[in-house]
């Protein structure tokens, strides 16, 4: 837990006793409210003190503390830095930079808070509270760096995992596409085989039908008996005999004619 330094300035130089009394009254009222943790009303009292004495260091310093407690970090930082610009006293500078470091740490500006604590120790080197807060800020920075490093590693790991996962998914998709294509080709081949088989069956049916038709036509043709066949053969042989006799007769006649022509009466 960061230790917050609250310093109340008791001795204040004012231009007149009346203004000094009014300033002290507002500061005491603000301190009472601050201790009761009513920081908003304490802020009002400290501003009244500054309205009475604009150069009131205690009023300005305590106003910064009240703003810090209300988590008005930007306003508190501006208040402390404004005081530090013109301050020459090392003890006061140590207190101011201590509170600047606390404010920056609450704003998660770790590097700037570390530098503010170092600046506080340069002016007030024996402050144990500042040393503690400096180490606390350094540890926060180291934890933040480790967290960022782990985050980067996790992102790289997730990136590699996503890459491997996408690779596996792509491979699975390719395998699915291949299986689908193989199945499609298989189905197409089967369909083609079925078509070929159907065509073969159709061709066989046509052949069977043609054979059956031819057989029926053969069965419908008139059959010749044995006797008819013998008579037909005898008739053919008789015709052949007549044809041979006619040929011999014509041949003999031709020879006779030639012989008559040779024996002339001179």
Image (cartoon, rainbow, N blue to C red):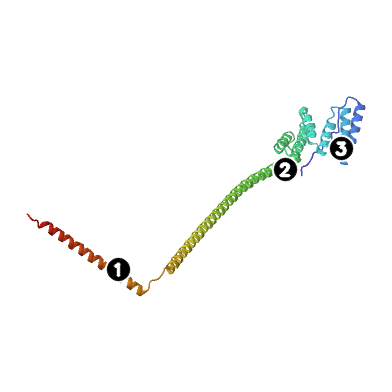
What secondary structure is found at the residue carrying circle 3? helix
Residue carrying label 1? 236
Q: Quadrant of the N terminus?
A: top right
Marks 1 and 2: CB-CB under 8 Å? Answer: no
Mark-to-mark CA distance, 1 and 2: 141 Å
Picture residue at 92% right of the left edge, 30% below the top:
22
Label 3 vs label 1, nearer the camera: 1
Q: Which mark is residue 136?
A: 2
- 42 or 191: which is nearer to us? 191
Label 1 vs label 2, nearer the camera: 1
Residue 249: quadrant of the picture: bottom left
Q: Residues within 10 Å of mark 1 (few under 14, many from 20)?
A: few
Mark-to-mark CA distance, 3 and 2: 28 Å
Q: Which mark is residue 40?
A: 3
- 184 or 27: which is nearer to us? 184
From the viewer's perspective, tell me whether residue 191 is left or right of residue 70. left
Marks 3 and 1: CB-CB under 8 Å? Answer: no
Residue 119 position (above or below residue 221): above
What secondary structure is found at the residue carrying circle 2? helix
Q: Which mark is residue 187?
A: none
Q: Residues within 10 Å of mark 3 (few under 14, many from 20)?
A: some
Q: Quadrant of the C terminus?
A: bottom left
């Amino acid at each position: 837990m960061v230790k917050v330094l609250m310093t109340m300035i008791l001795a204040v130089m004012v231009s007149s006793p009346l203004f000094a009394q009014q300033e002290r009254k507002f500061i005491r009222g603000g301190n009472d409210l601050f201790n009761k943790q009513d920081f908003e009303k304490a802020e009002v009292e400290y501003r009244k003190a500054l309205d009475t004495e604009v150069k009131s260091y205690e009023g300005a310093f305590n106003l910064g503390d009240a703003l810090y407690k209300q988590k008005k970090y930007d306003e508190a930082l501006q208040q402390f830095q404004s005081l530090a610009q013109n301050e020459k006293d090392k003890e006061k500078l140590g207190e101011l930079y201590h509170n600047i470091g606390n404010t920056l740490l609450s704003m998660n500006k770790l590097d700037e808070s570390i530098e503010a604590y170092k600046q506080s120790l340069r002016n007030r080197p024996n402050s144990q509270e500042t040393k503690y807060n400096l180490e606390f800020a350094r540890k926060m920075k180291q934890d933040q760096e480790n967290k960022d490093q782990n985050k980067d590693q996790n992102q790289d790991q997730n990136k590699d995992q996503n890459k491997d996962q996408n690779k596996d998914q792509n491979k699975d998709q390719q395998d699915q596409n291949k299986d689908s294509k193989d199945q499609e080709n298989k189905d197409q081949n089967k369909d083609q085989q079925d078509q070929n088989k159907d065509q073969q069956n159709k061709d066989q049916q046509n052949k069977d039908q043609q054979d059956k038709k031819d057989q029926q036509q053969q069965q419908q043709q008139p059959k010749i008996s044995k006797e008819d066949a013998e008579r037909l053969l005898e008739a053919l042989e008789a015709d052949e005999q007549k044809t041979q006799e006619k040929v011999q007769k014509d041949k003999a006649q031709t020879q006779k004619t030639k012989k008559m022509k040779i024996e002339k009466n001179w």
